[in-house]
C-alpha cells in the first residue's frame, strides 16, 4: 500500500532524512518514532506528497506521492492543524467534502458517523470556540471525509489531556480494524506499542531499527526473570511475604531454585518481563551514541 525507497530530503547542506526505505501493507498500522529532529515529520510529509524528496521515491496506493489520484486515497493529519475558526464543524467538513467531490448526502452521512464515533458534541459551535481536543476531533473527521484507504497522522494526540488522548488512540485502532492503512508518529511510546503492527525508529534522519515489537525486543531489548522464593537469598528483597530476585537468564533461574532448596525453601513463582518499546528505543539511542563515539577521531596523546 505504501512503498518508500531510499528517501532523502536535503535543506541546503543539511539532510533531514537520508536513505529511508520501508513499506507498509494494506490494513497495517506502522509507527515512526524518534527524538525531536529525527526526521519523522519530514518523512510523513514526503509520504503525503506535501514535499518532494531530494532523492528516492514514494508510492501510495499504487500512485506516486503527489499525484492527484493519490490525494483522493489519502487522509493526512499534521501535528499542527489550523482550522477555519469562523466556521462550525458541520460547515467546515462540508467545505472539505466539496473539495473532494463528495456529494451532500454521502458527506452528511460520513460527517454524522465520524463525529458520533469521535463523540463530538456541539457540532454547530464555532470552531474558534472549541477546546483543543474538540478541534483535534474535527481535524480527524476532515482526514476521513473522502473515505481514504491510507491515513498519515503526525502526532494525532499531541498536547491533549489523557482522556481525549486515549479516546483518539482507541479511535485510530478502530480505523485499522476497518481495514485502513495507517502511518503515524507519536512521542508516547506506550500508545505506539499498544496499536502498531510494526515500528521504525528514526535518529538523525535515518531509520536505525525497524520491525514488530517482538523483533525489536529480540535485537535491542532485554528479558529479565522475576523469581519469588520462600526464603531469603543473596540479592533478594522481601516482598509481600516472599523474597524477590531479578535475574537475566534461565541458568540464573535454575541456580536460584537450587539455592532456595539448599536453604530449606523453594521457588513459588517465576515471571518473565520483556523490554518495553521505550526501553528498546533508549537502547537503540545508546547504541547509536556509542557507535558515533567510536567513529570520532581521538586526539593524539601529547608527547
Image: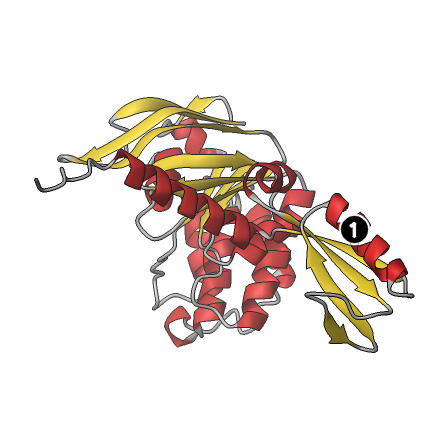
Residue 74 visible to the viewer: yes
Q: How many marks?
A: 1
Judged from the image, the secondary structure of the residue bearing numbered disc 1 is helix
Q: Residue at x 24, y 27 (%)?
A: 54
| Residue position marked by numbered label 1 in the rendering | 255
The one nearer the camera, 55 or 20, is 20
The one nearer the camera, 148 or 46, is 46
Q: Quadrant of residue 299?
A: top left
Q: Residue at x 35, y 67 (%)?
A: 85
Q: Position of residue 194 (x, y in %)?
A: 63, 52
Residue 224 sits above or below residue 228 on the image: above
Q: How is the image coloured?
A: secondary structure
Residue 76 visible to the viewer: no
Q: Quadrant of the N terminus?
A: top right
Q: Position of residue 215 (x, y in %)?
A: 61, 36
Q: Residue at x 42, y 42 (%)?
A: 287
Q: Is residue 13 left or right of residue 210?
A: left
Q: Quadrant of the C terminus?
A: top left
How packed is label 1: few (under 14 Cα within 10 Å), some, or many (20 or more)? few
Q: Is residue 138 left or right of residue 251?
A: left
The one nearer the camera, 181 or 228, is 228
Q: Position of residue 33 (x, y in %)?
A: 45, 47
Q: Position of residue 152 (x, y in %)?
A: 47, 43
Q: Residue at x 55, y 69 (%)?
A: 164
Amino acid at each position: 500500500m505504501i512503498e518508500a525507497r531510499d528517501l532523502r530530503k536535503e535543506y541546503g547542506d543539511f539532510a533531514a532524512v537520508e536513505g529511508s526505505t520501508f513499506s507498509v501493507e494494506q490494513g497495517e498500522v506502522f509507527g515512526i518514532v524518534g527524538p525531536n529532529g529525527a526526521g519523522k515529520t519530514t518523512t510523513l510529509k514526503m509520504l503525503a506528497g506535501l514535499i518532494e524528496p531530494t532523492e528516492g521515491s514514494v508510492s501510495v496506493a499504487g500512485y506516486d506521492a503527489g499525484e492527484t489520484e493519490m490525494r483522493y486515497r489519502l487522509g493526512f493529519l499534521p501535528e499542527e492543524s489550523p482550522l477555519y475558526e469562523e466556521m462550525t464543524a458541520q460547515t467546515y467538513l462540508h467545505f472539505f467534502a466539496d473539495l473532494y467531490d463528495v456529494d451532500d448526502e454521502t458527506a452528511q452521512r460520513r460527517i454524522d458517523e465520524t463525529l458520533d464515533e469521535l463523540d463530538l458534541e456541539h457540532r454547530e459551535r464555532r470552531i474558534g470556540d472549541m477546546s483543543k481536543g474538540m478541534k483535534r476531533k474535527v481535524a480527524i473527521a476532515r482526514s476521513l471525509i473522502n473515505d481514504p484507504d491510507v491515513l498519515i497522522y503526525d502526532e494525532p494526540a499531541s498536547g491533549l489531556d489523557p482522556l481525549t488522548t486515549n479516546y483518539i488512540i482507541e479511535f485510530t485502532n478502530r480505523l485499522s480494524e476497518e481495514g485502513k492503512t495507517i502511518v503515524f508518529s507519536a512521542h508516547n511510546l506506550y500508545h505506539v506499542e499498544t496499536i502498531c503492527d510494526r515500528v521504525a525508529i528514526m535518529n538523525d534522519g535515518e531509520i536505525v531499527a525497524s520491525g514488530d515489537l517482538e523483533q525489536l525486543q529480540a535485537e535491542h531489548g532485554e528479558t529479565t526473570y522475576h523469581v519469588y522464593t520462600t526464603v531469603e537469598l543473596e540479592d533478594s528483597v522481601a516482598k509481600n511475604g516472599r523474597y524477590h530476585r531479578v535475574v537475566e537468564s534461565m541458568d540464573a533461574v535454575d541456580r536460584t531454585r537450587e539455592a532456595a532448596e539448599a536453604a530449606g525453601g523453594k521457588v513459588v513463582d517465576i515471571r518473565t518481563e520483556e523490554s518495553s518499546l521505550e526501553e528498546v528505543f533508549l537502547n537503540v539511542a545508546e547504541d547509536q551514541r556509542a557507535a558515533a563515539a567510536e567513529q570520532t577521531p581521538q586526539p593524539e596523546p601529547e608527547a
